Amino acid sequence: MNYQAASSAAAARLGPDDKFLAGGQSLLSAIKLGLAAPSGLVDVRRLAELQGITVDARAVRIGGATTHATVAASSDVQRALPALADLAGRIGDRQVRNAGTLGGSLANNDPAACYPAATLALGATIHTSSRTIAADDFFQGLFTTALQDGELITAVSFPIPRAAGWQKFKQPASRFSLVGVFVARFDAGVRVAVTGAGPGVFRCAELETALARDWSAAAARAVKVSADGLNSDLHGTPEYRAALIPELAARAVAAA
């Protein structure tokens, strides 16, 4: 397998069957398990232009190669969007948080990953090497996104809501979310995104409607979520996951 370190985002080019390497927490594991076999890796994790955090009155912008630990420790993020700092600080373990990156997580789009929930619930904008993509258009199913071949996530802009909260119910062995719920309240309404429960991250319209009428834990708990299409495995039935969604949403509202 060929390896090269990119000198800049503009110069980062993939050959046939090559992959970008950011934190490597998902890709390297997939390679070891024989689930991915790229012919080469283009390392972008040390590019200064893909790192860093900037905050203004309307948004938090985070570079694609910024680690979870950096986001969690940022006083700017803690002040402007504390739910996002909280989410980043609870991803995996210390090693994962210090190696894994925002862009790598979103590009992989694991159905149980945490960052997709925040990105979708906050209505974030994904900036790439060639365009911008709205969060509602970015996530397209199991390990599938709107990214085209050779397209690199350079940054993500998260609008600052009036209030936001994040709660997850972890599978103890993997530390991934059996179910995770991110809620965000804006002047224009409420957005709620769920991870872990289905084949990919998704918005929950029932909770959004209920919380737009009454932003309270009680309103969230009163919602009944359908189990249709939800995951079923040794960790939980679709009905169990459906029951977790409003309960975690209620806890997220309370935390917000």
Image: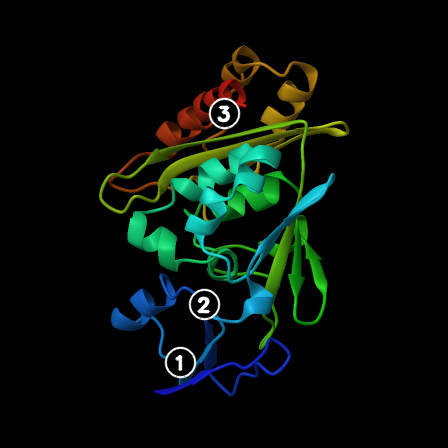
Q: Give the mark toward the camera: 3 or 2.
A: 2
* Rendering coords of residue 130 (x, y %): 70, 71
Give the mark nearest the N terminus, 3 or 1: 1
Q: Is residue 139 above or below residue 217?
A: below
Quadrant housing the N terminus: bottom left
Marks 3 and 2 sit apart, C-alpha to C-alpha, by 30 Å
Q: Which mark is residue 38?
A: 1
Name the side, left or right, on which 49 lies relative to 201. Answer: right
Give the mark nearest the N terminus, 3 or 2: 2
Marks 1 and 2 sit apart, C-alpha to C-alpha, by 14 Å
Which quarter of the figure has residue 240? top left
Instruction: Identify residue for label 2.
Output: 22
* Rendering coords of residue 44 (x, y %): 49, 73
Name the side, left or right, on which 153 lies relative to 31. Answer: right
Marks 3 and 1 sit apart, C-alpha to C-alpha, by 39 Å
Q: Please tell me how crowded label 1 is: few (under 14), some (14-19), or many (20+) other residues with Cα within 10 Å.
A: some
Q: Which mark is residue 252?
A: 3
Residue placed furthest toward the top? 218
Q: Is residue 214 above or below residue 96?
A: above
Q: Amino acid at mark 3?
A: Ala
Quadrant housing the C terminus: top right
Per the image, label 3 sits on a secondary structure element best described as: helix
Q: Give the mark toward the camera: 1 or 2.
A: 2
| C-beta proximity under 8 Å, tags 3 and 1 | no
| C-beta proximity under 8 Å, tags 1 and 2 | no
Per the image, label 2 sits on a secondary structure element best described as: loop
Q: Is residue 4 visible?
A: yes
Q: Please tell me how crowded label 3 is: few (under 14), some (14-19), or many (20+) other residues with Cα within 10 Å.
A: many
* Rendering coords of residue 69 (x, y %): 42, 49
Q: Amino acid at mark 1?
A: Pro
Which quarter of the figure has residue 145? bottom right
Q: Amino acid at mark 2?
A: Ala
